[in-house]
């Protein structure tokens, strides 16, 4: 049997809901069924006001469709209720490009039909919502286009032939583009009809024109993951580590630089703050092994961020207050805990029990403080208390737990800590020194205030959910991630 899987949608009014049931003739809107010759898809098209769209054109395309070289696989037209169906679809990756009769509104959906051994599956799909078309204004020099060349947005019906007027004007315009983010384009040379593809990040907004005029002066960089970084993972019989934060050094004039992998992945580049030579960045590689990775440095038309990198500073100076990023104002989010890492010179504080850093005030506070024995750096956990448990007027904090280690001994050390709910893991110089449950859980960390020491290469981060403790692996996967992070920071 064929199985239908929705991958990505633009202009949708509802989220797909899957349920196992027999197909009904009463209402086929958004229902996928199986026929003898393949899979049938059916759904409904509505306008921006939620009204069914009659006579909308529905085009079924291959996911790598190039309009200048191929026709749609199949087409359909919606009835008076906005419904349509397309049958006899074989397994493969597809796209649906939908437009109204006037071709002023459109929607775009991607989907995959896969082979499956399941006896029967019915899938209710979201309805397609038509929105105002977007357009593109592209600088001719961006991709060294000449008269007679053709530019297509891969996977769509949108192509344009470059003419003499375009070359003279220095720009070419493509209209009737469905609001959607597209990541590949196809270029066809007019001289020899040679075809090439380019990775892009073009995010089209309903009713707006996207301008891409700057030449894409791309360059390449390599990132090497040494065998040592993978040593803890290999001890666990694992060959890869997920969502690894990796330092990258590069010089670029791009306002919003990104990395493009040879697999077509777009990687965010986080510029390390207060870096003196502006060449230090962090990126997140989805999965690493001991290998050398090659990336293309390109420009994005908008800022691309990573949910795993919260903040990073070349130097977190005394007195600095560190809060979250665009995802969340605090430092604890996405249910995967909070991590911080930094280098410290280890000089002894001038004042006993001096504070190195402290989380901003909340019901629970985490603080790194010098102990009475000034060579010890202690991770202290405080709990807010008050005689008035309703208003907490005149509240105060009491120390509940303390995790102390020789760090302030005059030598340079790397300190790495991760808190997930009530579990704390502390790495010092690449070794686990604490891995234990605390008395209290941290549900939120609103931010951090840096105390008396300058903290070099300070990073606040989150990790992927696959690294959090499970019944099979405990915290070993997190240990391997933290060790690789430490190795790459050296």
Image (cartoon, rainbow, N blue to C red):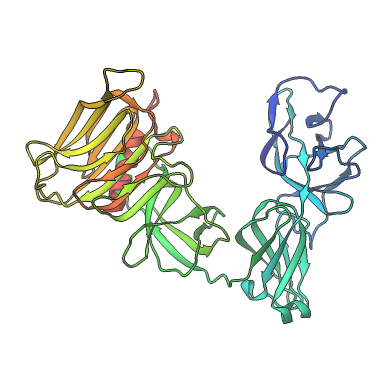
Q: Position of residue 73 (x, y in %)?
A: 82, 49
Image quadrant occupied by the C terminus: bottom left
Residue located farthest toward the left when viewing the structure as drawn:
373
- Nearer-the-camera pick, 303 or 428: 303
Q: Is residue 289 visible?
A: no
Image quadrant occupied by the N terminus: top right
Give left or right: position of 314 versus 369. right
Looking at the picture, does residue 81 appear above or below residue 249? above
Give left or right: position of 357 versus 238. left
Residue at the image position 12 percent from the left and 45 percent from the top: 408
Residue at the image position 77 percent from the left and 62 percent from the top: 175
- Nearer-the-camera pick, 25 or 360: 360
For the image, the number of numbered tags is: 0
Q: Position of residue 161 (x, y in %)?
A: 78, 70
Residue located farthest toward the right when viewing the structure as drawn:
80
Q: Position of residue 363 (x, y in %)?
A: 32, 28
Looking at the picture, does residue 390 appear above or below residue 199? above
Looking at the picture, does residue 144 appear above or below residue 455? below
Looking at the picture, does residue 264 appear above or below residue 217? above
Q: Is residue 37 visible?
A: yes
Q: Quadrant of residue 184?
A: bottom right
- Nearer-the-camera pick, 302 or 122: 302
Residue at the image position 58 percent from the left and 73 percent from the top: 215
Q: Quadrant of residue 110?
A: top right
Q: Position of residue 336 (x, y in %)?
A: 41, 34
């Amino acid at each position: 049997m064929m199985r239908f899987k929705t991958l990505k949608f633009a202009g949708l009014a509802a989220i797909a809901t899957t349920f196992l049931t027999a197909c009904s003739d009463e209402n086929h809107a958004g229902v996928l069924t199986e026929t003898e010759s393949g899979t049938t898809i059916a759904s409904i098209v509505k306008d921006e006001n939620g009204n069914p769209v009659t006579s909308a054109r529905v085009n079924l395309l291959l996911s790598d469709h190039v309009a200048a070289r191929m026709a749609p696989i199949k087409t359909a037209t919606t009835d008076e209720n906005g419904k349509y169906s397309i049958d006899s679809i074989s397994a493969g990756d597809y796209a649906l490009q939908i437009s109204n009769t006037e071709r002023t509104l459109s929607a775009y959906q991607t989907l995959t039909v896969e082979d499956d051994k399941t006896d029967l599956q019915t899938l209710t799909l979201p309805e397609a919502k038509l929105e105002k078309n977007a357009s593109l204004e592209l600088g001719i020099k961006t991709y060294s286009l000449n008269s007679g060349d053709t530019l297509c947005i891969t996977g769509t019906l949108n192509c344009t032939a470059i003419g003499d007027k375009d070359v003279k004007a220095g720009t070419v315009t493509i209209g009737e583009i469905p609001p959607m983010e597209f990541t590949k384009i196809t270029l066809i040379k007019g001289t020899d009809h040679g075809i090439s593809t380019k990775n892009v990040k073009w995010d089209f907004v309903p009713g707006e024109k996207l301008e891409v005029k700057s030449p894409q002066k791309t360059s390449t960089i390599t990132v090497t993951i040494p065998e040592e970084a993978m040593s803890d993972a290999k001890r666990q019989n694992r060959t890869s580590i997920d969502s690894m934060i990796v330092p990258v050094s590069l010089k670029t004039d791009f306002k919003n630089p990104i990395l493009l992998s040879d697999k077509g992945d777009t990687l965010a580049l986080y510029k390390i703050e207060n870096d003196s030579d502006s060449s230090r960045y962090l990126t997140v590689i989805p999965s690493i092994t001991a290998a050398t990775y090659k990336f293309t440095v390109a420009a994005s038309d908008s800022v691309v961020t990573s949910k795993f990198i919260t903040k990073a500073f070349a130097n977190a100076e005394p007195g600095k207050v560190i809060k979250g990023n665009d995802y969340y104002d605090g430092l604890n989010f996405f249910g995967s805990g909070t991590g911080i890492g930094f280098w410290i010179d280890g000089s002894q504080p001038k004042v006993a029990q001096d504070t190195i850093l402290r989380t901003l005030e909340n019901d629970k506070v985490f603080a790194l403080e010098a102990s009475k024995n000034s060579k010890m750096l202690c991770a202290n956990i405080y709990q807010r208390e008050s005689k008035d448990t309703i208003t907490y007027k005149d509240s105060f904090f009491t120390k509940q737990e303390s995790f102390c280690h020789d760090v302030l001994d005059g030598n340079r050390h790397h300190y790495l800590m991760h808190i997930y709910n009530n579990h704390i893991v502390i790495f010092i110089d690449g070794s686990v020194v604490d891995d234990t449950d605390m008395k209290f859980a941290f549900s939120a960390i609103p931010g951090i205030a840096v105390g008396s020491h300058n903290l070099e290469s300070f990073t606040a981060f989150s990790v992927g959910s696959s690294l959090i403790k499970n019944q099979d692996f405990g915290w070993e996967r997190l240990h391997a991630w933290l060790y690789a992070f430490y190795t790459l920071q050296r």
